[in-house]
Image (cartoon, rainbow, N blue to C red):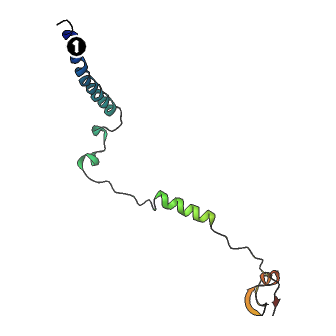
Amino acid sequence: MRRLAPLALAAALGLSTGCFVFDEIDKGQQIMKQHSGRHPERQAPSAAEGAEPAQEDEGPGLLARIQAFWDQRHEEAAPERSPDDAIVTCDLGGDTTFTYQSDCLSRGGRIR
């Protein structure tokens, strides 16, 4: 009997600690809700009535704006040419092509 009483006491305390843990978790959740910043009484009256606020057209989303920025930064710019660099007829290796004068000369062609 002397051995049975401490075992029964240990079992009762062991099984009751689970309730204590769940009570503390519930109290913690209530405290978090109080300090979360989402209070129904602080919401705008239109949100409390269920009316949807008018959404502004803010344009493309964040990913689309990032993609557009990336494409703009990394697109190949057309080479800047001097105003006197005209398009000419170029004989290059037996073929006749229309290229800029500087391109024709740099490729070893003859201007016609």
Height in image: 77 above or below 66? below
Closer to the camera in the image, 45 or 60:
60
Figure quadrant of residue 56: bottom left
Closer to the camera in the image, 29 or 1:
1
What percent of the width, then of the height, locates residue 106? 81, 80
What percent of the width, then of the height, locates residue 25? 30, 28
Residue marked by disc 1: 7
Amino acid at circle 1? Leu
Q: State the residue at coordinates (23%, 22%).
A: 15
- Of all residues, the one furthest to the top in this rendering is 2
What percent of the width, then of the height, locates residue 34? 32, 31
Figure quadrant of residue 71: bottom right
Height in image: 56 above or below 6? below
Crowding at dot 1, Cα within 10 Å, few <14 / some 14-19 / many 20+, comes out as few
Closer to the camera in the image, 56 or 15:
15
Q: State the residue at coordinates (74%, 93%).
A: 96
Figure quadrant of residue 79: bottom right
Q: Which part of the image, by quadrant, shows the N terminus?
A: top left
